[in-house]
Image: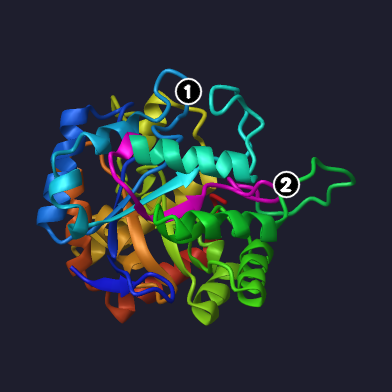
Amino acid sequence: MEFRKLGKTDIDVSVICLGTMTWGEQNTIEEAHEQLDYSLDNGVNFIDTAEMYPVPPNKETYSLTEQYIGKWDKMKSQRDKFVLATKIVGPFWDDYIRGGKNTFNKDHLLKAIDSSLDRLGTDYVDLYQLHWPERKTNYFGQLGYTVQNSEEPWTPIQEVLETLNEIKKSGKVREFGLSNETPWGTMEFLRISGEKELPRMASVQNPYNLLNRSYEVGMAEVSHREQCGLLAYSPMAFGALSGKYLGGKKPAGCRLTIWEYFDRYNNPQAIAATESYAQIAKKHGLSLAQMSLAYVNTRPFVTSNIIGATKMEQLKENIESISVKLSDELLQEIEAVHVKHPNPSP
């Protein structure tokens, strides 16, 4: 396994991070614990979750993922062996999370971290992230920013950071991060934290994969120059980059089969790009999954690659991607496909 610094902190995280958003929906608690054990035994020290998980979110399964992790036998016996990250939801469309109208004001932040800690069965989390912006902006597949003539008020960034500072001083959180954030938002958090001596964001968790490299447009430079690295989620594009959906296949039990409305990575342009990437992987004797993950692993602005799996064989293949080396020839062929099919799945 390889390790990288989490931002400017002294925390070392594995380049492969174990994602957990299927636990409680597509995976049982026993399967979740098996994944945790295997990952820890194979060098992965970074676990990412969220209060909203599993996905897709609903009232019946809300917070099950955190609960599953909290019941893992190593949560207390080996707590110092892994880095644990979770998230507070942004503005939410239902009222089952803290009565709805969720914001990042002091009341919501304090209640959310305490609830997560209780479910996780731990006194602290290493990384606490704002799951998506409170303000209206472009995220979750929206490339273009739409100017709002009027919008709901949102908690000022300085106020958010002041509450996070209180939480950090309490010992409940070591570091903080952003998620689904934009260049403007990231730089504002960093600017204000520097000017006011408040907690500095250590990372940004945004989507990044061969079908969606939009992070490179504005955010990659921010990550590089500000040492606020990317925690890449959806590196397999909801499984599309395994190739299992090519040819119109709809394998039973798979995400894009169960929830057809998750069509972000299954449009005609994305399918054409995936077919081309599959041919490159075959030519170079690699599985499409490992080539796709290895590409993310090797990007200089990436701190960690958040993998997810519903089956153990998938998990093993994903973790093994850390050992896959991509030749210059292969990388040039990937770039040629990217030029032909740029970001078909924003």
The label number, if any, that marks residue 58 in the structure image:
1
Label number found at residue 136: 2
The residue located at (20%, 58%) in the rendering is 80
Q: Give the residue type that dot 2 points to.
A: Lys
Q: Measured from the top left, where is residue 294 in percent x and y?
A: 29, 65
Q: Which amino acid does the dot numbered 1 rest on?
A: Asn
Where 81 sits versus 69, above or below?
below
Q: Residue at x 50, y 43 (%)?
A: 88
Which residue is at a point 68% across and 56% down the rendered structure image?
159
Mark 2 / mark 1, whichever is N-terminal: 1
Say few, some or many: other residues with alpha carbon within 10 Å of mark 1 (under 14 / 14 to 19 / 20 or more).
some
Image coords of residue 74 (percent x, y): 14, 45
- In 3D space, how far apart are the residues under numbered discs 2 and 1 (Cα atoms)? 22 Å
Above or below 309: residue 144: below
195 left or right of 110? right
Image side of residue 263 versus residue 332, left or right: right
